[in-house]
Image (cartoon, rainbow, N blue to C red):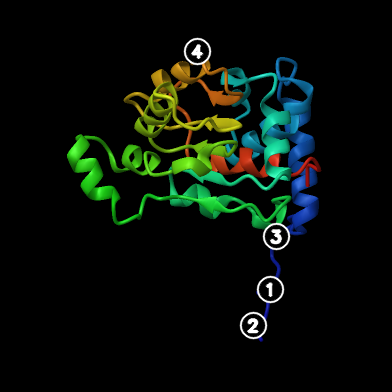
């Protein structure tokens, strides 16, 4: 058995205590007044994942996002993501119905489809999500092209998810794709972080918070 190193620093190392202290500090320091009450725990987890108190100023949460996502997850809906890192960051024990988590980026059909369409592999992977997308929870945190592609599929009459967490990161298309989501005529409940910020950690943290009402 490994021997623990000699303790030389005074620090909190109990996981539950760390979470409680972190969430308490965030609630004390962040201005959550513009966040819907039912979405506060989601935004708190996102701030915790990013270490960025200023994130709250750019978060926009549809009034039905929390209710729609949680009802879908409780009913066993799958989760579709655009990045393996998001799938890996989703805490399976928090999922209420052992919900399947799908990322098709490594599907063997993706490279050829992306080349044929002249688009990114992320956008091509979204096109393969199929009928199971209907009523699912979508978490896009990497590629703006994936979010644009999803919205175009829906506009063409494709399956509609129950909720979309749209937090793609980047300098090209990121801000524009999030704005397109908030303005899409489908009115699908959404969560976005406006601007260039985003990423897998933010996206996974939002899913984890939506998966269970208890904050810890």
Confirm or deny contact between disc 3 and disc 1 (CB under 8 A): no
**Mark-to-mark CA distance, 3 and 1:** 9 Å
**Mark-to-mark CA distance, 4 and 1:** 56 Å
What residue sits right under mark 3 in the picture? Answer: 9
- Of circles 4 and 1, which is in front? 4
**Mark-to-mark CA distance, 2 and 4:** 55 Å
Confirm or deny contact between disc 3 and disc 2 (CB under 8 A): no
- Of circles 2 and 1, which is in front? 2
Q: How many marks?
A: 4
Q: Residues within 10 Å of mark 1 (few under 14, many from 20)?
A: few
Where residue 197 sits: x, y (%)?
A: 47, 28
Q: Quick check: can you spot residue 212?
A: yes
Q: Which one is in front, 121 or 27? A: 121
What residue do we see at 79% from left, 36% from top? Answer: 24
Q: Name, please, the residue furthest toward the bottom.
A: 1
Ranked by sequence position, the earlier of labels 3 and 4 is 3
Confirm or deny contact between disc 2 and disc 4 (CB under 8 A): no
- Of circles 3 and 4, which is in front? 4
- Name the image quarter holding residue 107: bottom left
Could you say whether the residue bearing mark 3 is in a helix, strand or loop? loop
What residue sits right under mark 2 in the picture? Answer: 2
Q: Which part of the image, by quadrant, shows the N terminus?
A: bottom right
Tell me, for residue 183, which label it has, or none.
4
Could you say whether the residue bearing mark 4 is in a helix, strand or loop? loop
What residue sits right under mark 1 in the picture? Answer: 6
89 relative to 97 in the view: left or right? left
Could you say whether the residue bearing mark 2 is in a helix, strand or loop? loop
């Amino acid at each position: 058995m490994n021997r623990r190193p000699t303790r030389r620093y005074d620090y909190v190392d109990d996981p539950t205590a760390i979470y409680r202290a972190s969430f308490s500090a965030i609630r004390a320091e962040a201005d959550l007044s513009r966040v819907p009450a039912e979405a506060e725990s989601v935004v708190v987890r996102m701030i915790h994942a990013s270490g960025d108190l200023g994130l709250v100023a750019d978060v926009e949460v549809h009034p039905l996002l929390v209710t729609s996502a949680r009802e879908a997850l409780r009913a066993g809906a799958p989760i579709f993501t655009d990045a393996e890192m998001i799938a890996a960051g989703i805490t399976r024990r928090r999922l209420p119905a052992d919900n399947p988590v799908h990322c098709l980026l490594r599907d063997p059909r993706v490279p050829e489809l992306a080349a044929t369409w002249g688009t990114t592999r992320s956008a091509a992977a979204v096109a393969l999500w199929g009928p199971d997308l209907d009523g699912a929870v979508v978490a896009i945190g990497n590629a703006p092209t994936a979010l644009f592609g999803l919205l175009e599929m829906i506009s063409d009459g494709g399956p509609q998810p129950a909720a979309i967490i749209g937090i793609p990161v980047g300098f090209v298309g990121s801000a524009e794709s999030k704005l397109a989501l908030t303005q899409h005529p489908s009115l699908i409940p959404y969560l976005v972080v406006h601007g260039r910020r985003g990423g897998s950690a933010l996206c996974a943290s939002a899913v984890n918070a939506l998966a269970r009402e208890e904050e810890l």
